Amino acid sequence: MITVQNLYHSYNKDDRYAVKNVSFEVQKGEIFGFLGPSGAGKSTTQGILTGLLQLQQGEVSVAGYDVKRSSPEMFNKIGMSFEQSNVYSKLTAKENLQFYRKLFDVETREPKELLKLVGLEGKGDIQAGEFSKGMKHRLTFARSMLNNPELWFLDEPTTGLDPAIAAEIKDIIKRDNKKGVTVFLTTHNMFIAEELCDRVAFIIDGEIKLIDSPRNLKLQYGEKLVEVEYIENGKSVREKFSTVLDKDKKRLQDIIGNYEIQTMHTKEATLEEIFIKVTGRGLV
Amino acid sequence: MLKRIWAIFTRDVKVSMRTFISLYILVVPLILAFAINLFTPGINDTTINLALLEADNPEQIAYFKSFAKVELFKDVESVQKRVEARDNIVGILPEGDKHYIMIQGNEPEGVIDYAKLINSLNELDIQVEDTNAEIIEFGKTVPPLKRTLVNGVLLLISILGGMLIAFNIVEEKADRTIRSINVTPTTRNTFILGKSLLGLVLPIFGTIATVFICGFGDVNLLQILLIVSAASLLSLLVGFIQGLSSDDIISAVSIIKLLFLPLFASVLAIELLSAKWQKFFYWSPFYWAYKGNNAVLSQTSTWQQILSYTGIVIVLCGIVYLIAAPRIRKGLE
Ligand SMILES: Nc1ncnc2c1ncn2[C@@H]1O[C@H](COP(=O)(O)OP(=O)(O)O)[C@@H](O)[C@H]1O
Ligand SMILES: [Mg+2]
C-alpha cells in the first residue's frame, strides 16, 4: 500500500534533514505506526506521503500512485486526519462535512452518521468556531473518513483528547481496520502504538532505528522481570528479579522458600522502555 | 472541476454573508448607487424648462411644448423674474416674427445650447416628425458629474471584489483549511478559480445593480460588464496576494486600499488634466477602464473601442499576474 525508499527531506533545502534516509513498506490491511518523540520527523514523513510537502529525494509510492507525479485521483482513495485540527470556524459541523463531501469524486458517507460516530451527535448545527479543542479534533477526524478511504493517515489521532473519547477513537480505528482499511498513524504515545499497531517504526532525529511488531520487540528486547514484596526482619522489602539470569533465579527461589511473600508480579518491559534501550532517548 | 469550483464559490458566499465586514462590502455598491441618485439630478430632470409668454402664438407654444417643459407668463417682466430664480430655466421671447433667448448666465451650457437649438428649429419650421434621434439624445444628456460618479463606483466595486477574496483567503489561513483541501482531489487551479469567482461575481452583480439604479439601464450592458470584469482581474490578483501575505482582515484591507491611489489618479487625470499629460497614466488599468466606462455610459462607445480598452486592461493585469504568480502558488502550499 505504501513503499518508501531512501526518503530525505530538508525544510531549508540544505543538509539539515528533518527526515533522513527513511525506507519502509506498509502492507495492505495493516496498521503501521510511526513512534517517536516530538520533532522526530513523523509529521514531515506523513506530509510527503500525502503530497502536502513536495518530495525532494527518494522514491515514494502511495496506494499505487507515484507521489512524484501528483495525481488528484489518489486523494479519492486516502483520508487524512491532521494533528492540529483544521475546520472552517464560520461553518457548522455539518456544513463543514457537506462542503468537503463535494470535493470528492467517489461515494461519500453521510455527515450525520459520521458526527454520531465521533460523539458529536446533536452538535451538527453549531459553528465549528464555538467548538472546544477536542470537538474540533473529532470533527477533523470525522472528515478524514468522508470518502471511505482505503488508506487512512492519522497524525496523532488521540493526542489531547480525554481518555473516554480517545478510547472511542481507537475503537473506530480498529473497526475500520477490520473492514480492510490500511492505517498509517504517527504517535508519541506508546500505549496507542502498542494497542493499535501491527508493526511500529521507531523514529528519532529523522531516522528509522528499527521496525517490528510490538510483540516481537518485547520478546526480543524485554527481559521478563518479577517484582516481589516480602517481609524481612519485620520490614517490608521490594525487589526485582530477572527470570533469565541464573543469579536472580536462585535468589528468587531462596526468598520464596524462606520469607513471607506479600505480593509477586511479573513485569513486562514497556514499549517505551524498549524505545529508550534502542534509541537511548525517551518519548517526550 | 466545475462542481468543485461551484462548491468553493458557494461556500465563500455563505461565509461572507455571515461575516459583518464582508456582508457590508456586498451591499456597499447598492448604497452608493442610491446615494448617487439622491445627490445628483436624474437623467430626465435635465429636460429643458422654458418660460414663454402667454400671449405668444399658440402654435409656437405647442411647438416648444413638444421639446421641453413650458411655463407660461403674463409679461416679459414675470418671465425675467422666473429666469432669475435659482433653477435652470430659459426664457424665449418674441421679437417681431423672431424669438430671442433670455438667460440668467449661470445655466449649464448644454441647457442654453438646447434652448438655442429648439429656437432655431422653430424658426426653420422643423417639426417633431422631422427631428432625428440626435435632438432627443441631446435633451437626455446625462450630467457629467453623475456619469463620473457612476463610473467611479463601478471601478470601486471591482476593488471590493478583491477585498472579499482577500478576506476569504485570510479565513482559510486562520483555519488552516488549505491543507485539508490539498488532501482532496481538488487541484490548485481549481481552488484558485473557485476562490476568484466571488471577485468577479460581486463586480458583475454590483455593476448591473448600479447601472439600473442610477438610470443607465439603456446603455450597452455587455460592453460595460466586459470592461468591469477586466478591471476586476487586477483587484483579484491583489486580493490573492494580500490574502496570502496577511494574517488578519485589517492588514489585508490596508494594502488593498492602496489600489485606490491609481484609481483616483486615473479618474483625475482623465477629468482634469490636458491631453499631453494623459500618456503618463497609460500604465494604469483603471485609466483604460474608466475611459471605456465613460464611452459606454455616454452611449458613444463602439465595439472596436471597448474591445481594445479591455484588451489593454487584460494585458496590464497579465503583467501583474506574471510578477505575482510565483508568490501566489507558493502561498497556497
Ligand atoms: N514548516 C517547517 N519549517 C521548518 N522546519 C520544520 C517545519 N516543520 C517541522 N520542522 C522541523 O522538522 C523536524 C521534524 O518535525 P515534525 O515532522 O513535525 O516532527 P514530529 O511530527 O515527529 O513531531 C523538527 O525539527 C521540526 O522543527
Ligand atoms: Mg507531528
Image (cartoon, coloured by chain):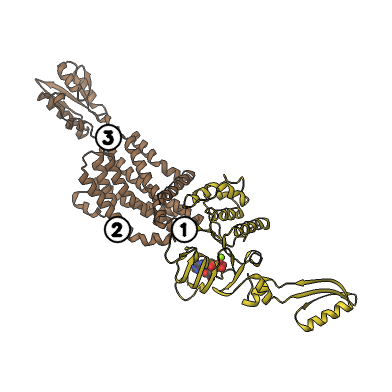
First in sequence, mark 1 or 3: give its number: 1
First in sequence, mark 3 or 2: give its number: 3
Tell which subunit mark 3 falls on: B
Instruction: Give whichever of A127, A183 is nearer the camera.
Output: A183
Give the residue displayed 22% in from the left and 42% down from the top. Answer: B301
- Crowd rating for badge 3 (residues with CA inside 10 Å; few <14, some 14–19, many 20+): few
Tell which subunit mark 1 falls on: B
Residue B272 is at least partly visible in this image:
no
- Relative to A52, does residue A106 appear above or below in the rendering? above
Closer to viewer: mark 1 or mark 3: 1
Instruction: Give whichever of A64, B75 is nearer the camera.
Output: A64
Visual hue assigned to chain A:
yellow
- Relative to A31, does residue A138 appear above or below in the rendering? above
- Asked if the residue at tag 2 contacts the one at tag 3, i.e. Cβ–Cβ closer than 8 Å, the answer is no
Q: CA distance from mark 1 to mark 2?
A: 28 Å
Quarter of the image containing the C terminus of chain A? bottom right
Cβ(mark 3) to ligand 1 < 8 Å? no
Both labels 1 and 3 in a single chain? yes
Q: Position of residue B292 (x, y in %)?
A: 25, 45
Report the side of B310 relative to A41 (left or right): left
Q: Which chain is brown?
A: B
Q: What amino acid is labelled 3 in the image?
A: Asp
- Determine which of the numbered discs, if any, sits on residue B218 in the image: 3
Q: Position of residue A164 (x, y in %)?
A: 68, 56
Which residue has dot 2 on it? B319
Q: Quadrant of residue B42?
A: top left
Give the residue displayed 43% in from the left and 63% down from the top. Answer: A70
**Element class at badge 1:** helix
Instruction: Give whichever of B208, B76 is nearer the camera.
Output: B208
Give the residue displayed 84% in from the left and 79% down from the top. Answer: A253
